[in-house]
Amino acid sequence: MIAKRIFDIVLSMLGLAFLSPLFAIIAIWIKLDSPGAVFFRQVRVGRHGNLFRIYKFRTMVANAEATGRQITVGDDQRITKSGKFLRRYKLDEFPQLINVFLGDMSLVGPRPEVPRYVALYPPATRERVLSVRPGITDFASLEYKDENAVLGHAADPERVYIEEILPVKLHYYERYVSERSFCADIKLIWHTLKAIFN
């Protein structure tokens, strides 16, 4: 959809320009709070199975993935002081506007997963979900905006994510692919902004 791509480029450019002062403040805070890079970059699976590196503000100690799970659970001890604030208000997600501008992602679409979880998708579902660009927000993002807290109360967070949460997310991903439209994207962006400010 050419119109959707143009919409993504224009809004991501405007967003990056408007948020650049905030990005600078956050970057300084992260550097002062803990050693390590400002951005966290992780390999995710994009459209047609192409791999890309997603941008987020770093909210955990350096090399956190080497010391624990790829999912974040509850009051994860790897999360920094600045990271707790950034995660609470979803500010760590804003650098994904870079991915949108580059064409790796869209503003709205199924959330991109790491390869190990995509490998668990049923073949037909994987083909369908990966037929569109992944997005910053979608139905599943709104439904599981407190996912970390939910997993924090689980005895086996990895199992709960794979067996209970992921199947529901896949349902929402497929729903988006089936029902996607410009109006639906606008509504999802609006509801996402409301959820952040609330």
Image: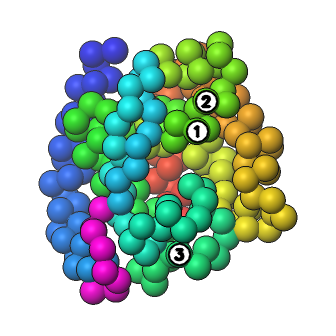
**Secondary structure of residue under mark 2:** loop
Q: Is residue 59 in view from this perspective?
A: no
User: Marks 3 and 1, how far apart in space?
Assistant: 21 Å
User: Marks 2 and 1, how far apart in space?
Assistant: 5 Å
Query: Is 84 colored magenta in this rendering?
Result: no
- Specify the principal SS of the magenta part: loop
**Secondary structure of residue under mark 3:** loop
Dots 2 and 1: beta carbons under 8 Å? yes
Q: In x, y percent, where is residue 126?
A: 59, 21
* Residue wearing tag 2: 119
* Residue wearing tag 3: 78
Q: Quadrant of the C terminus?
A: bottom right
Residue 116's label in the rendered image is: 1
Q: Mark 3: which amino acid? A: Arg
Characterize the local packing of mark 3: few (<14), some (14-19) or many (20 or more) Cα atoms within 10 angstroms.
some
Q: Mark 1: which amino acid? A: Arg
Q: Report whether 120 appears left or right of 39.
A: right
Q: What residue is at 73 percent from the left and 53 percent from the top?
A: 158
Residue 171's label in the rendered image is: none
User: Marks 2 and 3, how far apart in space?
Assistant: 26 Å
Q: What residue is at 60 percent from the left and 59 percent from the top?
A: 69
- Quick check: 30 above or below 57? below
Q: Is residue 95 in view from this perspective?
A: yes
Q: In x, y percent, where is residue 86?
A: 43, 71
- Quick check: 21 above or below 81? above
**Secondary structure of residue under mark 1:** helix
The tag earlier along the polypeptide, 2 or 3, is 3
Q: Quadrant of the N terminus?
A: top left
Dots 3 and 1: beta carbons under 8 Å? no
The span shown in magenta is 32-39
Q: Residue furthest front?
A: 66
